[in-house]
Image: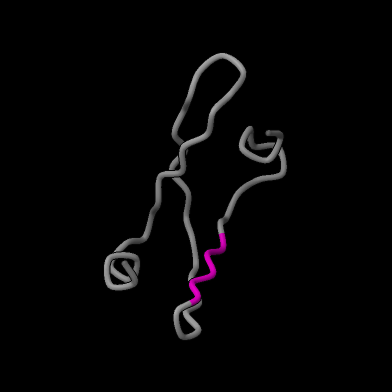
Amino acid sequence: MIDILRRCDTLRVAFLDDEYPYIVPVSFGMEVDGENIVLYFHGLREARKLIL
C-alpha cells in the first residue's frame, strides 16, 4: 500500500451524506513511521468534506 501511495499525487475519498455517497479527489501528503501511515489532506475550509 505504501508503494502505491508513493506513486500517487491525488487520492479519492468517499463520504456518505444524508442522501447519497459521493467521492472527492484530494491532494495529500504522507508520513510513514514503521507500520504507521499518516495521511495529510489539502482542502479549503469552505469545502463540503469538512462540514460532514
Q: Nearer the viewer, residue 45 or 39?
A: 39
- At a point 54% along the width and 69% down the height, the residue shown is 38
User: Which residue occupies the extreme front position in the image?
Assistant: 35
Residue 10 covered by magenta stretch: no
Tell me if residue 18 comes above or below residue 42 in the rendering: above
User: Which residue occupies the extreme bottom position in the image?
Assistant: 34
Q: Nearer the viewer, residue 38 or 50?
A: 38
Residue 47 on image: x %, y %: 64, 37
- At a point 50% along the width and 84% down the height, the residue shown is 33
Tell me if residue 49 comes above or below residue 35 in the rendering: above
Residue 20 on image: x %, y %: 50, 18
- At a point 56% along the width and 63% down the height, the residue shown is 40
Quadrant where the N terminus sits is: bottom left
- Look at the magenta stretch and give its main secondary structure: strand
* Magenta extent: 36-40
Q: Is residue 50 left or right of residue 14?
A: right
Residue 49 on image: x %, y %: 61, 37
- At a point 46% along the width and 37% down the height, the residue shown is 14
